Amino acid sequence: MTFVQLCFYLFAAILVFAAGMVVTIRNPVKSALFLVLAFFSAACIWITLEAEFLAIVLVLVYVGAVMVLFLFVIMMLDIDLAVLRSGFARYLPVGSVIALLLILEIALVMVSGFGAEDYAAPAAHPADYSNSKELGRLLYTQYVYPFEIAAIILLVAIVAAIALTMRKRPESKYINPTQQIRVRREDRLRIVRMKSAPRQETPAGGPAAGGEE
């Protein structure tokens, strides 16, 4: 067994363990952390397959951005762990059946001749080979139309998300910051001049102010 194969089996075992902990552990924060470990293990496997660009994208995008956002959302929400634990036993039989079917499908594929020995080993690349450059060349030449279609779909999704977020609902309260900073004194304050009341003089021999009668 070569060093690359040993690394592949090691990271694959860690990936399977982390994926199992993601779906079985009850604490959502720990589940998200195990998902980060699964992403790192998958990135290491892609590096052994000479897919460095995909490995870096997986770490930077999913681990560095998406999973951090998930962790912030999970820690900010008031999640009742007792409610999550109560439904685990109820869905355990259905989940076990689905997991068993997936294992049987994987076993059938492996037994039917899907092995590494049936395929030729990929040719070794020179030292100056760039995976990112080769991927970009294929992406912008052979797959340029699917790439542009995917870009248009993502653009439509972004515009739709912004439109749904910025729309004004009649039942929601909205403050326009532009109108706030353009406020004038006359809009908030009204000065009213009132005539002073006539001064009443105390009659001679009358009780003094604050005195007893």
Image (tube, helix red, strand yellow):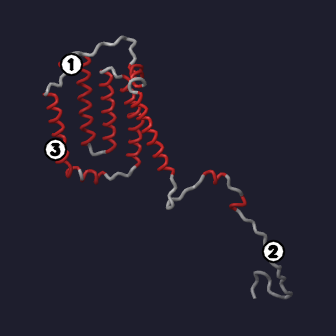
Q: Looking at the picture, does residue 13 appear above or below residue 74?
A: above
* Residue with the mark numbered 3: 97
Foreground mark, 1 or 3, reads 1
Type of amino acid under label 3: Val
Q: Is 70 on the left-hand or right-hand side of 27?
A: right
Of residue 50 and residue 30, the one placed in the foreground of this image is 50
Q: Position of residue 21 (x, y in %)?
A: 25, 39
Type of amino acid under label 1: Tyr
Q: Which mark is residue 185?
A: none
Helix, strand or loop under label 3 = helix
Q: Position of residue 197 (x, y in %)?
A: 80, 77
> What's the distance in space between the residues labelled 1 and 2, CA to CA?
102 Å
Foreground mark, 3 or 2, reads 3
N-term-proximal mark, 1 vs 2: 1
Q: Residue at x 43, y 25 (%)?
A: 140
Query: In which quadrant of the rendered view does residue 144 lie?
Result: top left
Q: Is 118 on the left-hand or right-hand side of 177?
A: left
* Residue with the mark numbered 1: 119
> What's the distance in space between the residues labelled 1 and 3, CA to CA?
33 Å
Helix, strand or loop under label 2 = loop
* Residue with the mark numbered 2: 195
Type of amino acid under label 2: Lys
Q: Is 157 on the left-hand or right-hand side of 99?
A: right
Q: Position of residue 132 (x, y in %)?
A: 41, 21
